[in-house]
């Protein structure tokens, strides 16, 4: 577990994710996402069937739990031990595992599980995978486990939402822009060698910080080992480790196009539509490489029957082209909801129901997609 993962765990030990989705603006996101989960099941022609579902980054089980209650066979993979404890306390019927979206074999989902899942949800990991290559790797891992007719739902945090709310709303815009300009000037003046030295210095600084909190982090993890902590224990131990949630977006910078550029140690990454398309392309490149490697290996030894069926579609590599992730739809689950939290809270139940209808009606409009706080892409495998 690296330094970034440790910070992420400490953050979610005190971040009230369950309460966020209970809020009115959170309910918009949750209900629309559930609507499109049901739509994905319908698009597969699988209504009323018990599906194999994989929820990667399951959190406290907000999506995994209800799906299990509906009769689906749900495997929930979560990195944060505290969230795992919450899931075990609140939900039954879940196959809960600790793991990383980039390497699901570490959660016991190795080659023998390829092509096993009809529906895969990844509604959180992309927020915290800072490197583009890590995002593509997580997509490729999900594709490995996705059944040929299955659906994959992937959520992202959007750039413009953060620029508007954090940059302008909380008045950090000049700071972020100045950092971006300073970074550009530094790169121009010092060149590549100095840039490498700067990166090495940052890594050295992070390692020093890791050593400073190691003892306190281990104390916090000991409290989690036996099960779920109380809210007071979580708050106390997270405060001892450090308030990683405070100003978690303040370390980055803005480039000339007002795109947020993360800095080492940031917990969140914010993207635009063109970034999502680039992640898909890179994931498909990884899938093709795996396909070609499987094809070479198949000439040397017999592959286990049924293995790699999500990559090969049940056929030997080389007989058909590598399958690719293709977009079936993309939608904004929250739209303007996060910009108007106070207004949503003031609505009557009837008015709020009308707002939900409104967001459902506009959530796939191309002219509005990048403006909301979140975006969810629905993908499936298609062989070429």
Image (tube, rainbow, N blue to C red):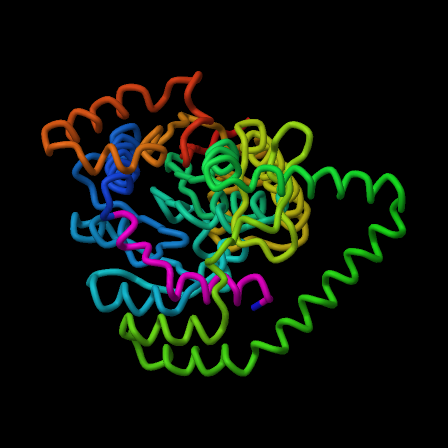
Q: Is residue 47 left or right of residue 175?
A: left
Up the image or down, 340 lies above or below 301; here it is above
The image shows residue 162 at horizontal and vertical percentages of 49, 38
> Magenta stretch: residue 310 in it?
no
| Residue plotted at (43% across, 72% down) | 239
Q: Is residue 235 left or right of residue 174?
A: left
Q: Viewer-proximal residue, 180 or 102? A: 180
| Residue plotted at (16% across, 24% down) | 354
| Residue plotted at (10% across, 29% down) | 350
Which residues, given as a range, are shown in magenta? 2-21
* Image quarter of the C terminus: top right
The image shows residue 1 at horizontal and vertical percentages of 56, 68
Q: Is residue 237 left or right of residue 136?
A: left
The image shows residue 51 at horizontal and vertical percentages of 26, 45
Up the image or down, 41 lies above or below 204; here it is above
> Magenta stretch: residue 7 in it?
yes
The image shows residue 241 at horizontal and vertical percentages of 49, 73
């Amino acid at each position: 577990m690296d330094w970034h993962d440790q910070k992420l765990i400490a953050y979610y030990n005190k971040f009230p994710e369950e309460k966020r989705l209970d809020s009115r603006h959170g309910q918009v996101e949750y209900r629309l996402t559930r609507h499109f989960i049901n739509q994905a099941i319908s698009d597969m022609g699988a209504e009323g069937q018990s599906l194999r579902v994989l929820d990667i980054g399951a959190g406290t089980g907000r999506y995994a739990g209800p799906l299990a209650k509906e009769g689906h066979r749900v495997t929930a993979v979560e990195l944060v031990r505290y969230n795992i404890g919450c899931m075990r306390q609140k939900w039954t019927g879940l196959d809960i595992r600790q793991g990383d979206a980039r390497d699901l074999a570490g959660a016991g989902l190795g080659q023998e599980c390829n092509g096993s899942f009809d529906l895969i949800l990844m509604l959180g990991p992309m927020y915290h995978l800072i490197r583009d290559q890590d995002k593509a790797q997580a997509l490729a891992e999900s594709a490995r486990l996705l059944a040929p007719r299955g659906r994959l739902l992937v959520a992202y945090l959007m750039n413009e939402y953060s620029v508007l709310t954090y940059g302008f709303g909380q008045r950090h815009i000049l700071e972020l822009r100045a950092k971006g300009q300073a970074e550009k000037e530094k790169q121009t003046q010092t060149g590549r060698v100095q840039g490498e030295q700067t990166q090495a210095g940052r890594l050295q600084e992070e390692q020093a910080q890791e050593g400073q909190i190691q003892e306190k982090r281990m104390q916090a993890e000991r409290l989690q080992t036996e099960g779920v902590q109380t809210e007071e224990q979580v708050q106390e131990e997270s405060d001892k480790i450090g308030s990683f949630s405070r100003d978690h977006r303040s370390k980055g910078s803005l480039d000339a196009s007002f795109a947020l550029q993360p800095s080492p140690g940031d917990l969140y990454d914010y993207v635009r539509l063109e970034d999502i398309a680039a992640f898909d392309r890179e994931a498909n490149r990884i899938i093709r490489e795996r396909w070609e490697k499987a094809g070479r290996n198949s000439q040397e030894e017999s592959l286990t029957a049924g293995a790699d069926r999500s990559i090969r579609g049940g056929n030997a590599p080389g007989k058909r082209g590598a399958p690719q992730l293709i977009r079936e739809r993309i939608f904004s689950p929250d739209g303007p909801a996060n910009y108007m939290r106070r207004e949503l809270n003031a609505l009557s139940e009837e008015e709020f129901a009308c707002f939900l209808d409104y967001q459902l009606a506009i959530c796939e409009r191309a002219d509005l997609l990048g403006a909301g706080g979140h975006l969810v892409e629905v993908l499936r495998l298609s062989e070429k």
